[in-house]
Image (cartoon, rainbow, N blue to C red):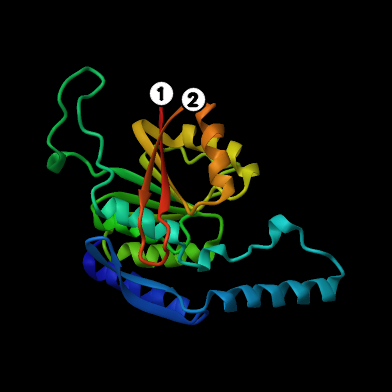
Amino acid sequence: MDVPRRQRTIRRLHARLAARFELIDEMLPVGPLRVQFTRVADPESVLNAICRRIDDHEQRTGERIQSDELGLPYWAELWDSATGIGMWLASGGWQQPTAKDEYGDRLPPAATRPPPAVLDLGCGMGLAGTVAALLGADVLFADIERDCLLFSALNGLRYSDRVRARKVNWQTDNLSERFDLIIGSDVLYEKTQWTYLDTFFRKHLAPAGKVLLGEPGRMSGDLFLPWIAERGWRLHRYEQSVPTRTTPIRLFELSEK
């Protein structure tokens, strides 16, 4: 995508979102970087609007919407875990696998190799994936909610024309592609999702690739560690301080043995 076309797309996305949401446009400090970022100004107002829509539907039809159909706007919050992953990436915490190929031959220098493929799974408004795009990665923003995909596309396109956004259900979808890095910001809060995530990671992780999960210190995160280790993943833990909280974000790095 050439620069003028990309700028037109950015303007259209911004106008489309501004027609529906009150927006904040700001320069976010993310480690050593400053990231131009557009987000929802008042996430609670988005939740209230959805609750009003649900109440109206139930009053008109007498039918209760099932919990998995509510579409609650978790994406409208800028989660600390996304900031933590972004800061870790910006500080060089993850580098594209280099070393040797499957035949033992040395790979070309990083500057001459294709950029790494990154999947921002459950991307929300796309902060972590936007940092990856700024750093030169090809990024696919993935989430089940369409609204947040518009935000993530807007934010990512400011830094790269090699970003995509796609509605993805990690319980059922097969993307038919693999990624050098899969990042997930605060996706471990429901234990019922872990088996689906485990399967999804195995289907979509490239050889020598890694999964990086940001987790804010919930009990569910504590329980996830032995659970995922029992399933044969190699696990490394890191901590990343973020300016919006007193305790660091936990980062769980997974790779296949």
User: In this view of the protein, can residue 162 be seen by the observer?
Assistant: no
Residue beneath the point at 76% across and 58% down: 66
- Identify the image quadrant of the N terminus: bottom left
Question: In x, y percent, where is residue 3?
Answer: 22, 66
6 lies left or right of 204: left
Look at the numbered disc 2 and give the secondary structure of its residue.
loop
Q: Is residue 254 above or below residue 240?
A: above
Q: Nearer the viewer, residue 218 or 16?
A: 218
Residue 30: x %, y % from top left: 29, 63
The numbered disc on residue 257 is 1
Q: How many discs mark residues in the rendered view?
A: 2
For disc 2, the marked residue is 232
Amino acid type at mark 1 = Lys
Q: Nearer the viewer, residue 76 or 191?
A: 191
At 35% from the left and 46% from the top, the residue drawn is: 118
Give the residue displayed 48% in from the left and 32% down from the top.
202
Report if the CB atoms under discs 1 and 2 are less than 8 Å apart: yes
